[in-house]
Image: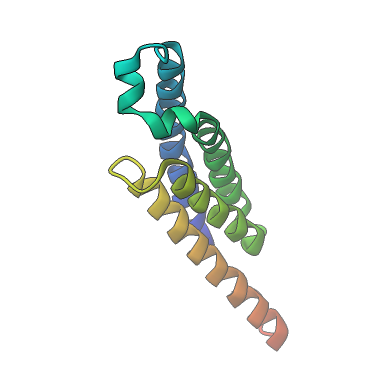
Amino acid sequence: MRNAAMVLGIIGGIVGMMVGFFGYAFTEILDMLGGVPALAAQFPETLADTERWRLAGLLAPILAIAGGAMTPGHSLLGALLLGASAWGMYEGFDYNLFTMFPIAMCALAAVLALGAGLALATSAATGKGRS
């Protein structure tokens, strides 16, 4: 489970990084063309919340890649980072066609890492060794 969580987290982070690049570029283009009233009227929520898009585009993929890389050694901490990444992508970009896969991959990786961490803690408590 730890290896599957690692792979899903890293792939989800890479796909999330591509979404973040496009989200950041989109906000930059809207900032450059923000003086055009017709364009500003089409994207009022994006213009009002550009920092949220930029922060989510930067932090969420980093959390996913770090959580995925951390999962084989520290499953519970990796699960926390992966869950935070899935939540950050959902809050930052909402759930749409481009974000459904990175959100789902990071959330599934968080569940797998949590399961692996709890199985390891249970086996350590019973004295059966590493699972």
Q: Residue shown at 48%/31% (left/top)?
A: 48
**34 relative to 59 in the view: left or right:** left
Q: Along the horizontal axis of the image, is 128 left or right of 18?
A: right
**Left or right: 36 as drawn, with respect to 28:** left
The residue nearer to you, when weighing 93 against 127, is: 93
Looking at the rendering, in which quadrant would you find the C terminus?
bottom right
Work out whether 29 lies above or below 43: above
**The image quarter in which residue 55 lies:** top right
Q: Residue at x 41, y 50 (%)?
A: 103
User: Which of 41/51 is in front?
Assistant: 41
Side of 120 relative to 18 (left or right):
right
Q: Position of residue 79 (x, y in %)?
A: 58, 60
Q: Residue at x 54, y 61 (%)?
A: 2
Q: In the depicted view, which residue is nearer to us: 122 or 37? A: 37
> Residue drawn 32% across and 40% down?
98
Q: Number of labelled discs?
A: 0
Q: Tell me if I can see residue 44 in this picture.
A: yes
Location of residue 114 (image quadrant): bottom right
Q: Which quadrant would residue 19 be assigned to in this image?
A: top left
Q: Is residue 7 visible?
A: no
Colour logic: rainbow
Q: Is residue 62 above or below residue 42?
A: below
Residue at the far bottom: name it.
Answer: 126
Vertical side of 120 occupied by 32: above or below: above
Residue 35 image position (x, y, % from top left): 41, 11
In the rendered image, residue 116, in percent from the top left (x then y), is placed at: 56, 69
Question: Where residue 39 sits: x, y (%)?
Answer: 32, 19
